[in-house]
Amino acid sequence: MKGKFVRIGVAVAVALGAATAVPAHADGGVTCAYTFQAWAGGFAADLAMTNNGAQPVSGWTVRMTFPTATSGINAWQAAMSQDTPYDATATNRSWNAVIVTGQMASFGWTAIAATTGPPTSVTVNGVAC
């Protein structure tokens, strides 16, 4: 399958064999780029959040809903929990909690028994991204 771009709550690049990031704007001055690379039975993903607002983002929580059940999440640069088979939450670590204006924080994860598509919704601190 060749890469194709899908616009949902976050701009997403879905590709097999190649990963591409596409920016999307969230209310409140945060720009998100979600990168997704799938393979048979799993995927790797990365979410980069850039603060374009006038004030620092002090602490962040990202909530995602996947279109199909996902399990076996293993994250880096964030603490990530599986709330339900369809929902996951990621929170900052102490060293990347503050995103000053013009700066970026990112985290990534892998999953097995996973969805073959992007999340149907992504929020950062409760705001759609």
Image (tube, rainbow, N blue to C red):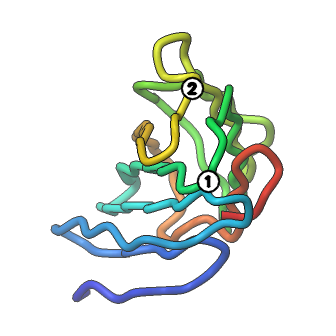
Residue 117 picture location, percent across and down: 51, 71
Mark 2 lies on a secondary structure that is: strand
Left or right of residue 93, residue 105 in this image: left
- Closer to the eye: label 1 or 2: 1
Please determine whether, in this image, residue 50 is positioned above or below residue 27.
above
Please determine whether, in this image, residue 51 is positioned above or below residue 14.
above
Q: Residue furthest front?
A: 54
Please determine whether, in this image, residue 80 is positioned above or below residue 13.
above
**Which amino acid type corresponds to the residue marked 2 in the rendered image?**
Val
Left or right of residue 2, residue 112 in this image: right
Which label is found at residue 30? none
Can residue 3 be spotted in the picture? Answer: yes
Task: Residue at 73%, 53% (x, y): give it.
Answer: 86
**Which amino acid type corresponds to the residue marked 1 in the rendered image?**
Gly
Q: Nearer the viewer, residue 44 or 96?
A: 96
Q: Residue furthest left?
A: 17
Give the labeled residue for mark 2.
Answer: 98
Residue 51 picture location, percent across and down: 53, 49
Q: Nearer the viewer, residue 101 or 112?
A: 101
On the rendered image, what quadrant is the C terminus found in?
Answer: bottom right
Density class for disc 2 (Cα within 10 Å; few <14, some 14-19, many ≥20) is some
Density class for disc 1 (Cα within 10 Å; few <14, some 14-19, many ≥20) is some
Task: Residue at 66%, 41% (x, y): give it.
Answer: 55
Task: Residue at 40%, 39% (x, y): give it.
Answer: 108
Residue 76 picture location, percent across and down: 40, 26
Which badge, 1 or 2, is on the more N-terminal residue?
1
Residue 40 picture location, percent across and down: 32, 61
Mark 1 lies on a secondary structure that is: loop
Which label is found at residue 53? 1
